[in-house]
Amino acid sequence: MPEKVILELERWKGLSSEELGLTAPDLKITTHRYENQWGQQFNVLVVDARKSDSDPTIITSTSFDYRIDELLENRMAILATRSDARVIVSETPGITMDRNDPFHTKGAWQTPRQTTLAFSGNLDPLALEQLRAIDSVVGLDEYAELQFFGESFSADAVVAMARVIAQRKFDKGIRITRMDLNEPVNAYGNYTIFRQAMMLRSLATREDRLLHVYLNENTLIGHGEVSAFEKQPNINKRADRYVKHRQIPATYLSGAGLRKGLHTALKDALSNVDSDGPHLRDAPIVIARGIDSSVSLEKDLISAADTIRDNGGQAKTISLEAPVGDKTLIAHHVTSSFARFASYTDARVQSLKEN
C-alpha cells in the first residue's frame, strides 16, 4: 500500500512569505536564456537557498505545455527554501517563451529528430539538451551529487535525464542521490488510445478546473497575487496564446509520447551501471499521486515501482491526501497550492533525513 502524506491547508493561513518559504534573506532567483549550437533557445531558472556548499542541488523540468513563469518561480522558492537547496529548472527545448519579448520569441523550435523520438516516447534528445543547458548556466562538477524532481510531464523528463546520464551520453558522470516522480501521467503506458484520449480530456477539463481551486487557496492563506501565466489577463494571456499556437507541434507531439509510459526508460537507467559510474540503484525513487487524480492511477504507480525493484532499484509509492475533515479533492495540480506544496516539501525533507 502507498504511504500517506497529508497536505495541509489550515496551518499555513496567515503566515508571512518568509514563514511559508516564498522568500528568505539570502534567496536568489535568476533566469538565464540558453542557446545551443543549433540556435535553439530556452530558459533555465535557478532558485538558490543554500546555506552552505554541502546543501543539495535539485534538478527538474517544466511540465507539459508550461514555461517558466511567476507561479513556477514561487513554487520552486518553496521547494528551495524549505529544503535548504538550489533548484534548477530547465524548460523543454521548443516549448519556451522569451518573457522580456514574448511576441518575438527566438529559437523556439525542435529538431525533427527531437520531435520524432519524443512522439515515440523517447525524450532523451530533449533531456540531453536540458542537461547541457543546466551545465552551461551553473557549471556542474564531475560526479556531482544531484537530486531529481519531476511532476507530470517533467517526471518523464527527469527519468529521461537519468537514462542519458546512465548511458554516458552526457559528458559528466552525475550521481543521482534521489528521484521524486509526482503525478506521472499514464505511468505504465499500457492503455488503449481511447483511454489515453480520456486522460488528456480529463487534464483539460476536470483537472484544469481543480487548478483554480488550488490557486484560490493561495488567496485564502494570504498569498494569492500570483497565478499561472495563462490565467492572467491582458498582455500575458495574449502572449501565452500566441506562443503556444506557434509551438503546438512540439508541445503535443512530445506530449503524445507519454503514451509509452516510464517503464522502458526506468529499466534502461537502472541497468546501465558500471564500477565507477553513477549508481541510480542506490538512489531512493519515490513515486507519488494525488489520491483523487484522474490521470495518475495507483495501479500504474505500483507497476512502475515494481519495475524499479525488479531492475535492482529502490522504490516507494506515496498517496497525497487531505487531512480528515478537509473535503478538497487532492488531484493532479495540487502542488499549485502553496500550502499543500509546503506540506509536501516538509514531508520530502523528513524522508531524506530518515534515509
Image: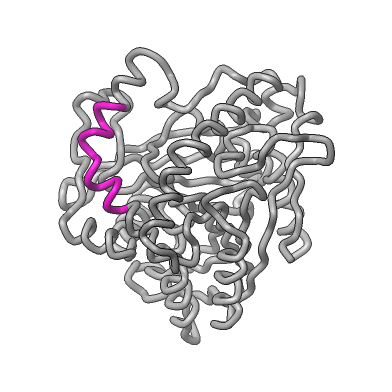
- On whether residue 95 falls in the magenta region, the answer is no
Q: Which residue ends up furthest to the top in the rendered image? A: 234
Is residue 40 depicted above or below 209 in this figure? below
Q: Which residue ends up furthest to the right in the rendered image? A: 324
Quadrant for the N terminus in the image = bottom right
Is residue 62 depicted above or below 326 in this figure? below
Quadrant for the C terminus in the image = bottom right
- Dominant SS of magenta comes to helix
The answer to which of 262 and 94 lies nearer the viewer is 262
Q: Which residues are magenta?
A: 241-254
Can residue 156 be seen at all in this image of the molecule? yes
The image quadrant that residue 325 belongs to is: top right
**In the image, residue 352 lies at what x, y percent?**
71, 59
- On whether residue 245 falls in the magenta region, the answer is yes
Can residue 142 be seen at all in this image of the molecule? no
Residue at x-position 60% and y-position 42%: 80
Residue at x-position 29% and y-position 27%: 241
**In the image, residue 332 lies at what x, y percent?**
56, 44
Is residue 56 depicted above or below 231 in this figure? below
Residue at x-position 15% and y-position 51%: 38
The answer to which of 262 and 15 lies nearer the viewer is 262
In the figure, is residue 304 to the left or right of 104?
Answer: right
Residue at x-position 62% and y-position 53%: 289
